[in-house]
């Protein structure tokens, strides 16, 4: 998750939403990073360039359609769209920092025209259950550190 937080900060530094994700796999007993990235919604001009989708797409291109031996770490709970992609890819597990409720609360009180922080108040667990694919979920992992990303400001250069 610390790598996902670093990726989120890099996304914020380039003018995007500071959201990061990492996908890991296991080699024997060692967990290794397979993909890591920061969000590109604002900088790409595409509302579907969520970092979870991009990392899933990257890993699928090298490891195949289904990813049961991989774990997705995201600083923010996957939205319904990204959670659906987790179902379709059969990801092995999901770990996230802040919830959709956290995102919604922050957006309501601090959202700006530039950084709206909209949320889709459908939990990823609900999507997984309705998608008929059991995906273990750990939410609130390093939550306080991930909450700090809401107000992340790039360092002055």
Image (cartoon, rainbow, N blue to C red):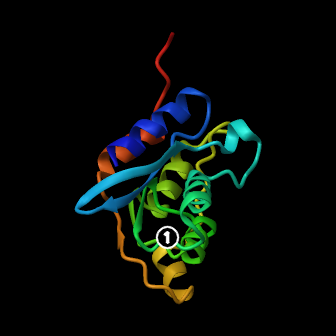
Residue occupying the point 67% across, 36% down: 114
Residue in the picture at 62% in, 59% down: 61
Viewer-proximal residue, 40 or 15? 40
Q: Badge 1: how crowded within 10 Å, few (<14), some, or many (20+)?
A: many
Name the residue at the left extreme: 29
Please give the name of the residue rendered at 53% of the width and 89% of the height, measured from the top-left corner. 132
- Against 156, residue 128 (above or below) is below
Q: Identify the residue under disc 1.
A: 67
State the image coordinates of residue 48 (x, y, percent, origin top left): 71, 55
Drawn side of residue 115 relative to residue 123, left or right: right
Q: Position of residue 32 (x, y in %)?
A: 34, 52
Left or right: where does residue 31 sit relative to residue 69?
Answer: left
User: Number of marks in the image?
Assistant: 1
136 or 18: which is nearer to us? 136
Residue 6, horizontal then vertical, whole percent = 41, 36
Q: Quadrant of residue 38?
A: top right
Residue at 22 percent of width and 62 percent of height: 29
Give the farthest residue toward the right: 45
Which secondary structure lies at badge 1? loop
The one of 110 and 76 positioned closer to us in this rendering: 76
Instruction: Answer above or below: position of 8 versus 134.
Output: above
Q: Is residue 58 left or right of residue 8?
A: right
| Front in this rendered view, residue 98 or 93 | 93
x and y, in percent, of residue 44 in the image: 73, 40
In the visual, does 103 lie left or right of 42?
left
The residue furthest top is: 157
């Amino acid at each position: 998750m610390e790598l996902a937080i670093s990726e989120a900060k890099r996304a914020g530094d380039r003018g995007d939403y500071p959201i990061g994700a990492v996908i890991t796999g296991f080699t024997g007993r060692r967990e290794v990073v397979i993909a890591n990235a920061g969000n590109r919604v604002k900088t790409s001009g595409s509302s579907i360039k969520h970092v979870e989708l991009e990392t899933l797409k990257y890993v699928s291109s090298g490891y195949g359609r289904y990813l049961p031996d991989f774990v997705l770490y995201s600083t923010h709970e996957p939205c319904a769209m990204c959670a659906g992609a987790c179902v379709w890819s059969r990801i092995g597990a999901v770990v996230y920092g802040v919830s959709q409720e956290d995102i919604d609360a922050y957006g309501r009180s601090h959202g700006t025209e530039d950084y709206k922080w909209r949320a889709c108040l459908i939990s990823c667990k609900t999507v997984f259950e309705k998608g008929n694919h059991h995906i273990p979920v750990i939410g609130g992992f390093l939550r306080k550190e991930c909450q700090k990303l809401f107000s992340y400001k790039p360092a002055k250069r």
